[in-house]
Amino acid sequence: ILRTHIRQHSGERPFKCKHCGKAFASHAAHDSHVRRTHSKDKPFSCDVCGTTFQEAQELKYHMKTHK
């Protein structure tokens, strides 16, 4: 965690996306970017309308539209 924090201040971004070249300070940020930006996989689906999402947080936000 400390290394990631230091990288944010130093500008070091050693985790580079092989698809678009964007670089990240943490492995977690890199992985999240790849899933959100380059993956077609949408494993989270709405039980009400069937809409699918790449991230659980997107589904959680979407569920508010059904209230």
Image (cartoon, rainbow, N blue to C red):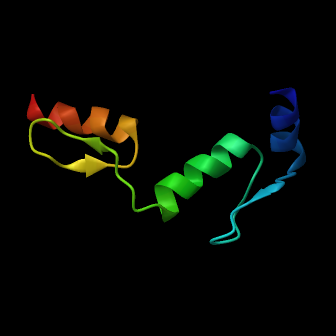
Q: Where is residue 49 in the image (x, y as percent from the top left)?
A: 9, 44
State the residue at coordinates (87%, 51%). 12
Q: Is residue 14 shown left or right of residue 64?
A: right
The image shows residue 34, relative to residue 60, as above or below, that is below
Quadrant where the N terminus sits is top right
Q: Is residue 26 shown left or right of residue 12?
A: left
Q: Report how many numbered discs are placed on residues in the image.
A: 0
The image shows residue 46, relative to residue 1, as above or below, that is below
Q: Is residue 56 shown left or right of residue 49?
A: right
The image shows residue 39, relative to residue 54, as above or below, that is below
State the residue at coordinates (86%, 27%). 2
Which image quadrant for residue 15? Answer: bottom right
Which image quadrant for residue 60? Answer: top left
Q: Is residue 29 shown left or right of residue 1?
A: left
Quadrant where the C terminus sits is top left
Pick the front one: 9 or 40: 40
State the residue at coordinates (66%, 51%). 30
State the residue at coordinates (38%, 49%). 54
Q: Position of residue 28 (x, y in %)?
A: 66, 41
Q: Position of residue 40 (x, y in %)?
A: 40, 62
